[in-house]
Amino acid sequence: MSSSLKHTPLAAAHVQAGARMVDFGGWDMPLAYGSQIEEHHAVRQDAGMFDVSHMLNVDVTGAGARAFLRRLIANDVDKLDCSGRALYSCMLNPQGGVIDDLIIYFFADAQWRVVVNAGTATKDVAWMRRVAQAGSHDVQIVPRHDLAMIAVQGPQARAKVWAARPAWQSASEPLAAFHAARVDADTLVARTGYTGEDGFELVVPAAEVEILWQDLLAAGVRPCGLGARDTLRLEAGMNLYGQDMDELTLPAEAGLSWTVSLKDPARDFIGRAALEAFGQPAAFVGLKLNERGVMRAHMAVHTAQGVGEITSGTMSPTLGMSIAFARVPKGVAAGDRVEIDIRGKRVAATVCKLPFVRFGQAVNA
Amino acid sequence: MSLPNDRQYTSTHEWVKSEGDVLVVGISDPAQSQLGDLVFVGDVQVGTVLKQGQTAGVVESVKAASDIYAPVDGEIVAFNDELESNPNLINESAYDAWIFKIKPSAAGAPQGLLDAAGYQQVVDAG
């Protein structure tokens, strides 16, 4: 095991399962345990699991928590109308740039949970604390380094989680998508994910995650690594922070306008003024390559409205063709034919809406 | 898997086998293992004349594209088009899944290629 990288409590389990490990944002993480394409298909057809313990759960508590989050977050947490309900949102800087994308859970007026990306966790917590202090919000920001997380995804995911943890079934079976149940003081079962399939993300005390992993293995869940995670999320039309957007990107330029709520004119969230001033400087679209080949990040996209750039690209295992996200000039629309510069050669592609795949099936764009 | 002795190798991870007056070329098992699942093999232009070391085509895994090179001066005379629909044949059996055939410009045994032991050193060096 590499000693200069950070490790989740499952690091030894990954190595034991034959994982090829890679440096992912300073964490020693499994790229794949064998064929990443087979891992991808296992999630679309059955059940696969991902160690996502490198991500950070942050408790946001206190009498001022709701007001604080309505200031901090571009989506409106007032939408969370019952305990356990979750929201996907961006956290913006005053220029409207995306600091991170994250999920917020409501449990009670004074009890919320925010889940942030691994590579941005330190930055995010520091930012949240600055905002809390600057606004004198009555709130505590509590990073939960004592928690670990496994995402189990696929049409058989929920059934296999219940096979491994029968005690969790009664509380988690009624959950709708984007809702969570606390099955224990520090154990959360959330019907969320990053693959476009059904499934649960399971949050447990770090000391309990290895036995959970082994029990899920015994229930027939396939370990899946970062390679499969990337092809799955791309097919599902889900952004990757640091690649599809960063602090210089407005939500609208990353296809994330739907996560911004301007509905309440009195809600002055950080970045609002900038969004309203800048509008949408560029479009964010999906691409399917018309010929054989692989689209990759940073390749130029030649359109009738000018040149754009691919932000994420891959070969889609489910579709058998290359797919990508791209930032392109405004006016480019679904159905347009464009050309991708692949190593000096122009290759035809078609613009389409996202996602490419939903619940295992290709979406006709 | 140990390196087959029935062929030669390049320092850029191709294997090279004589077949009559052409050389058959593929990539080694350590190379396919390093690349991971292959999703595209192509850009091989039959009829092109190349110098040793020039790019003859590309193999792409999900994570990266990797050029393959002409092992000798010569003309590309064939591409294994089974790889168009099944690039993973290389992952399954790197020493059976040939990629292209090249007819050397020079007569006689090809120069500058490694035997199995020589290529093993390349592999060991990482």
Image (cartoon, coloured by chain):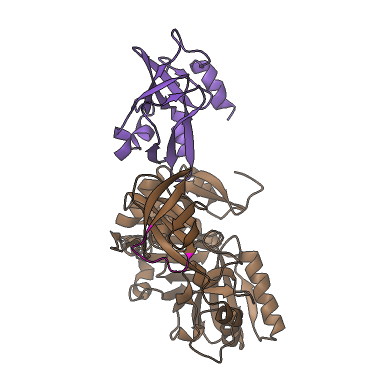
**Height in image: A4 above or below A153?**
above
Location of the C terminus of chain A by quadrant is bottom left
**Height in image: B112 above or below A305?**
above
Which of the two residues, A222 or A229, is positioned nearer the viewer here? Answer: A229
**Height in image: B106 above or below A307?**
above
Chain the render paints purple = B
Q: Which residues are magenta?
A: A329-337
Report the residue at 56% width, 78% height from top. Answer: A275
Left or right: B72, with B100 as reference point: right
Q: Is residue B122 magenta?
A: no
Residue occupying the far bottom of the picture: A266
**What x and y, as percent, mark residue B25?**
40, 23
Report the residue at 44% width, 22% height from top. Answer: B15
Which of the two residues, B119 or B70, is positioned nearer the viewer here? Answer: B70
Q: How many marks?
A: 0
Chain A on-screen colour:
brown
Location of the N terminus of chain A by quadrant is top right
